[in-house]
Amino acid sequence: LLRNDQWLLLCAVCVIGTVGYVVRGSVAAYYAKYYLGGDARLLSAFLATGVVAAILAMVASTWITKRWCKVAMFRWTQLLVGVLSLAMYLLVGPGDVALAFVFYFLICFVVDLHAPVFWSAVVESVDYGHARAGTRVAGLAMGGISFCQKAGMGLAGAIVGMLLAGFGYVPDQPQSETALNGIALMLTLIPGVFHALMGGVMFFYRITDGYYQEIKRRILVDAPAP
């Protein structure tokens, strides 16, 4: 498994992407409450917007990957998240509620288009390793990815705590200009960098749709006769 370069690449992608997810998700409520100046109703609506966008992304991803290479979609959607995150940071000011909702929906929608692709890519990386080494290690491969996901969550949790403290965030009080800017950065640009980096790393992922068909044929040829 450790000689499977494509699986190792997905491990790195998993850690990087999870950090971006957790940082954004951890401050979404703070952004709605302090940066947008919203009450409990607006906070709930803001968080619900992200959930709805994620659900719609799962449906859209299935439709898109029937017509476009899923690996290409993975790469370019994550790079697009970086662009949208930068745009949201630059264009949405404190109290710009409507524009914030639009950008947050777009970011949550685009970022989750890759989710079904990622898990299918893990399975394909197992087949890739099987074709190269002749040994199938699916259980350990999935467990390793799950470990990387947990590692990313732990790393992101530490990053969130350090950033909030560094920006001077104080709970349940009017925030300083530095703290508000920091919260905006943590919802937009900082996770956007992680997602753009994830998209960049995926340019080294070689198992495209066409190549995967070749891998499956190779496995079938090398399989023992029944």
Image: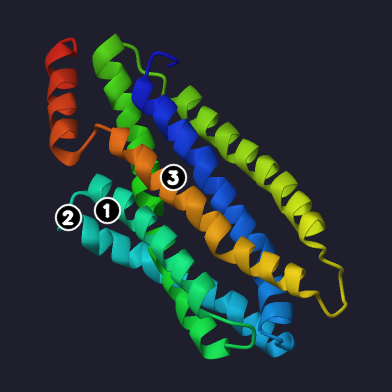
Q: Are marks 3 and 1 in contact (CB under 8 Å)?
A: no
Q: Residue at x 34, y 40 (%)?
A: 202
Left or right of 181 on screen, residue 118: left
Residue 83 point in image, percent of width and height:
40, 63
- Residue under circle 2? 68
Viewport quadrant of the N terminus? top left
Residue 172 point in image, percent of width and height:
87, 76
Label 1 residue SS: helix
- Residue 55 visible in the current orientation: no
In the rendered view, tell whether residue 123 sits above or below residue 156.
above
In the rendered view, tell whether residue 95 sits above or below residue 154.
below
Left or right of 41 on screen, residue 194: left
- Residue under circle 1? 73
Foreground pick, 37 / 9:
37
Mark 1 to mark 2 CA distance (whole Å) = 7 Å
Picture quarter containing residue 191?
bottom right
> How many C-alpha atoms fall within 10 Å of the one at disc 2: few (<14), some, or many (≥20)?
few
Foreground pick, 138 / 42:
42
> How many C-alpha atoms fall within 10 Å of the one at disc 1: few (<14), some, or many (≥20)?
some
Mark 3 to mark 2 CA distance (whole Å) = 22 Å
Report the amino acid beneath label 2: Trp
Q: Earlier in the sequence, mark 3 or mark 2?
A: 2
Report the amino acid beneath label 1: Met
Picture quarter containing residue 87?
bottom left
Q: Earlier in the sequence, mark 1 or mark 2?
A: 2
- Residue under circle 3? 197
